[in-house]
Image: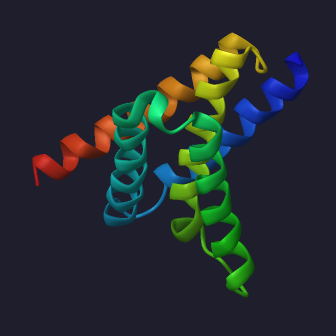
Amino acid sequence: MFFRSLFYERTLLSILEKVERLPLHNKVEIATRVGNFINHAKSVGDAVPLSRLLEVARNEREKIITQSEDPVLAQWAGPALAEGWCAAMLGVSEESMEKNCAIVIIVAIEDFVTKCAEIRRNG
Protein backbone atom coordinates (compact mmCIF):
# COMPACT_ATOMS: atom_id res chain seq x y z
CA MET A 1 0.00 0.00 0.00
CA PHE A 2 2.82 2.43 0.82
CA PHE A 3 4.41 2.43 -2.64
CA ARG A 4 1.06 2.71 -4.42
CA SER A 5 0.12 5.64 -2.19
CA LEU A 6 3.49 7.28 -2.72
CA PHE A 7 3.21 6.87 -6.50
CA TYR A 8 -0.29 8.41 -6.44
CA GLU A 9 0.98 11.30 -4.31
CA ARG A 10 3.89 11.95 -6.69
CA THR A 11 1.59 11.78 -9.71
CA LEU A 12 -0.83 14.34 -8.29
CA LEU A 13 1.95 16.65 -7.12
CA SER A 14 3.42 16.45 -10.63
CA ILE A 15 0.09 17.48 -12.14
CA LEU A 16 -0.14 20.32 -9.65
CA GLU A 17 3.38 21.50 -10.55
CA LYS A 18 2.41 21.57 -14.23
CA VAL A 19 -0.75 23.50 -13.42
CA GLU A 20 1.31 26.02 -11.46
CA ARG A 21 3.26 26.78 -14.67
CA LEU A 22 0.09 27.60 -16.64
CA PRO A 23 -0.97 31.19 -17.28
CA LEU A 24 -2.66 32.85 -14.32
CA HIS A 25 -6.16 32.81 -15.84
CA ASN A 26 -5.92 29.03 -16.40
CA LYS A 27 -4.74 28.42 -12.84
CA VAL A 28 -7.57 30.49 -11.40
CA GLU A 29 -10.14 28.73 -13.58
CA ILE A 30 -8.86 25.28 -12.56
CA ALA A 31 -8.70 26.24 -8.89
CA THR A 32 -12.24 27.61 -9.02
CA ARG A 33 -13.56 24.35 -10.47
CA VAL A 34 -11.67 22.26 -7.92
CA GLY A 35 -12.74 24.56 -5.10
CA ASN A 36 -16.38 24.28 -6.14
CA PHE A 37 -16.04 20.49 -6.16
CA ILE A 38 -14.44 20.46 -2.69
CA ASN A 39 -17.07 22.83 -1.28
CA HIS A 40 -19.83 20.69 -2.76
CA ALA A 41 -18.29 17.52 -1.34
CA LYS A 42 -18.00 19.09 2.10
CA SER A 43 -21.53 20.52 2.02
CA VAL A 44 -23.33 17.32 1.08
CA GLY A 45 -21.53 15.36 3.78
CA ASP A 46 -22.91 11.85 4.10
CA ALA A 47 -25.77 12.51 1.67
CA VAL A 48 -23.49 11.73 -1.26
CA PRO A 49 -20.70 9.26 -0.51
CA LEU A 50 -17.14 10.21 -1.40
CA SER A 51 -16.97 7.14 -3.63
CA ARG A 52 -19.76 8.61 -5.79
CA LEU A 53 -18.06 12.00 -6.00
CA LEU A 54 -14.80 10.27 -6.90
CA GLU A 55 -16.59 8.47 -9.71
CA VAL A 56 -18.07 11.74 -11.00
CA ALA A 57 -14.66 13.46 -11.08
CA ARG A 58 -13.00 10.44 -12.71
CA ASN A 59 -15.70 10.21 -15.37
CA GLU A 60 -15.38 13.91 -16.16
CA ARG A 61 -11.60 13.61 -16.55
CA GLU A 62 -11.87 10.50 -18.72
CA LYS A 63 -14.57 12.10 -20.88
CA ILE A 64 -12.36 15.11 -21.59
CA ILE A 65 -9.38 12.94 -22.44
CA THR A 66 -11.27 10.53 -24.71
CA GLN A 67 -13.26 13.19 -26.55
CA SER A 68 -10.26 15.25 -27.55
CA GLU A 69 -7.57 14.21 -29.98
CA ASP A 70 -5.04 16.26 -28.04
CA PRO A 71 -6.40 17.13 -24.58
CA VAL A 72 -4.49 19.95 -22.94
CA LEU A 73 -3.62 20.10 -19.27
CA ALA A 74 -5.92 23.07 -18.65
CA GLN A 75 -8.91 20.96 -19.75
CA TRP A 76 -8.42 17.84 -17.65
CA ALA A 77 -6.40 19.13 -14.70
CA GLY A 78 -9.44 20.36 -12.76
CA PRO A 79 -11.23 17.02 -12.79
CA ALA A 80 -7.92 15.23 -12.12
CA LEU A 81 -7.20 17.34 -9.04
CA ALA A 82 -10.79 16.99 -7.82
CA GLU A 83 -10.46 13.25 -8.31
CA GLY A 84 -7.17 13.24 -6.41
CA TRP A 85 -8.57 15.23 -3.51
CA CYS A 86 -11.58 12.94 -3.28
CA ALA A 87 -9.44 9.78 -3.54
CA ALA A 88 -7.19 11.05 -0.76
CA MET A 89 -10.13 11.91 1.48
CA LEU A 90 -11.62 8.49 0.81
CA GLY A 91 -8.22 6.86 1.35
CA VAL A 92 -7.99 8.40 4.81
CA SER A 93 -11.52 7.46 5.83
CA GLU A 94 -11.27 3.89 4.51
CA GLU A 95 -7.59 3.48 5.41
CA SER A 96 -6.95 2.39 1.83
CA MET A 97 -4.15 4.91 1.33
CA GLU A 98 -1.09 5.69 3.38
CA LYS A 99 -2.30 8.48 5.69
CA ASN A 100 0.74 10.74 5.23
CA CYS A 101 0.49 10.52 1.44
CA ALA A 102 -3.22 11.31 1.52
CA ILE A 103 -2.68 14.30 3.78
CA VAL A 104 0.05 15.68 1.51
CA ILE A 105 -2.35 15.43 -1.46
CA ILE A 106 -5.26 17.05 0.39
CA VAL A 107 -3.17 19.91 1.76
CA ALA A 108 -1.43 20.60 -1.56
CA ILE A 109 -4.69 20.76 -3.50
CA GLU A 110 -6.51 22.82 -0.87
CA ASP A 111 -3.55 25.24 -0.63
CA PHE A 112 -3.57 25.66 -4.41
CA VAL A 113 -7.31 26.41 -4.37
CA THR A 114 -6.94 28.88 -1.49
CA LYS A 115 -3.98 30.67 -3.08
CA CYS A 116 -5.81 31.07 -6.40
CA ALA A 117 -8.98 32.26 -4.66
CA GLU A 118 -6.93 35.01 -2.99
CA ILE A 119 -5.45 35.97 -6.36
CA ARG A 120 -8.93 36.14 -7.89
CA ARG A 121 -10.26 38.27 -5.00
CA ASN A 122 -7.35 40.69 -5.19
CA GLY A 123 -7.67 41.09 -8.92
Residue at 48% from the left image edge and 28% from the top image edge: 46
Image quadrant where one finds the C terminus:
bottom left
Is 70 drawn above or below residue 116 in the view shown?
below
Residue at 59% from the left image edge and 54% from the top image edge: 57
Drawn side of residue 74 relative to residue 68, left or right: left
According to the image, what is the colour scheme of the structure? rainbow
Is 59 drawn above or below residue 75 in the view shown?
above
- How many numbered marks are there? 0
Q: Where is residue 119 in the image (x, y as percent from the top left)?
A: 21, 47
Q: Where is residue 6 in the image (x, y as percent from the top left)?
A: 79, 25
Q: Position of residue 114 (x, y in %)?
A: 30, 35
Residue at 24% from the left image edge and 44% from the top image edge: 117
Drawn side of residue 8 relative to residue 23, left or right: right
Is 118 drawn above or below residue 24 in the view shown?
above
Residue at 42% from the left image edge and 29% from the top image edge: 45
Nearer-the-camera pick, 78 or 59: 59
Q: In which quarter of the image is residue 16?
A: top right
Q: In which quarter of the image is residue 111?
A: top left
Q: Quadrant of residue 88?
A: top right
Image quadrant where one finds the N terminus:
top right
Nearer-the-camera pick, 37 or 27: 37
Residue lying at the far left in this picture: please name it: 122
Residue lying at the far front in this picture: please name it: 47
Nearer-the-camera pick, 53 or 118: 53
Q: Position of residue 25 (x, y in %)?
A: 31, 65
